[in-house]
Amino acid sequence: MNALASLAPFARTWRPVARAGERCEMCAEPIDEHRHRHLVDLERRLILCACSGCGLGQAGAAGRYRTVPTRVLTDATFSLDDAQWNALQIPVRLAFIFFNSSLGRWVALYPSPAGAAESQLPLEAFAPVAAATPLVAAAEPDVEALLVYGRLGRPFQLFLAPIDVCYQLVGKVRVHWTGFHGGDRAWQEIESFFADLRAQSGAAA
């Protein structure tokens, strides 16, 4: 199966809080506006909106549904040079990489004006990156991703982030990107996104 095709259902507008009147997609109970959780449906490759009870009830479960964690971690010691990044064959310096259990391999996606785009990830090039940070081993399959970002001329930053947060970034790029280089508004949104992410992140063990 093509990795991007299997992830296409994920690419919809993400909401950090529920809309008024929204109901849990598991039990149909109303969702409290500020206690909004997401679940990954591994069979349909969908992310579902859930109430806090259903979300917490699936945490750690080994079944069809997986609760998307809320933790954000960063590795301040992580170092990646341009040659290592180029070896990953990701065309932009912004991507998220996660282990897709249905495909049995790591998948790399990057935001684009059309949504999430797949980059074929050479596993031999990813191995040294995986060995350079504990965040790779810490990432939960399907629900957490390694989010990598580095403006040209600046060092790369590495985060372990929930998969729904990564798709929030995809949505921002899709909405605000203009022209070939994106435009000032798009880059302001991206920088603001990562500033918020740094503010809520903890350090890797």
Image: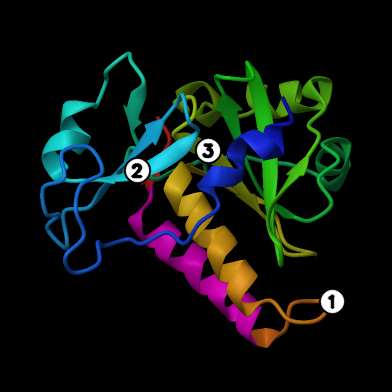
Q: Magenta segment, which residues?
A: 185-201
Quick one: SS at disc 3?
A: strand
Pick whichever, 54 or 88, lies toward us: 54
Tell me whether the residue at label 3 lies in contact with that at label 2, contact meaning CB atoms closer than 8 angstroms: no
Distance between the alpha carbons at the discs numbered 3 and 2: 18 Å
Image vertical order of residue 106 relative to residue 90, above or below: above
Quarter of the image with the N terminus in it? top right
- The amino acid type of the residue labelled 1 equals Phe
- The amino acid type of the residue labelled 2 equals Leu
Image vertical order of residue 191 relative to residue 145, above or below: below
User: Quick one: label 3 or label 2, which is nearer the N terminus?
Assistant: 2
- The amino acid type of the residue labelled 3 equals Ala
* Horizontal side of residue 130 vs 91, given as left or right: left
Question: Residue 57 location, x and y as percent?
Answer: 16, 28
Q: Quadrant of residue 189?
A: bottom right
Q: Quadrant of residue 52?
A: top left
Q: Which mark is residue 48?
A: 2
Image vertical order of residue 146 relative to residue 13, above or below: above
Question: Residue 154 location, x and y as percent?
Answer: 72, 62
* Horizontal side of residue 199 vs 12, given as left or right: left
By secondary structure, the bulk of the magenta-drawn segment is best described as helix
Circle 2 crowding by C-alpha within 10 Å: few under 14, some 14–19, many from 20? some
Image point 87% across, 36% down: which residue? 87
Question: Residue 71 location, x and y as percent?
Answer: 33, 42
From the image, tell me which residue sits under label 1: 180
From the image, tell me which residue sits under label 3: 145
Circle 3 crowding by C-alpha within 10 Å: few under 14, some 14–19, many from 20? many
Image point 53% across, 38% down: which residue? 145
From the image, state whether disc 1 or disc 3 is nearer to you: 1
Q: Is residue 76 visible?
A: no
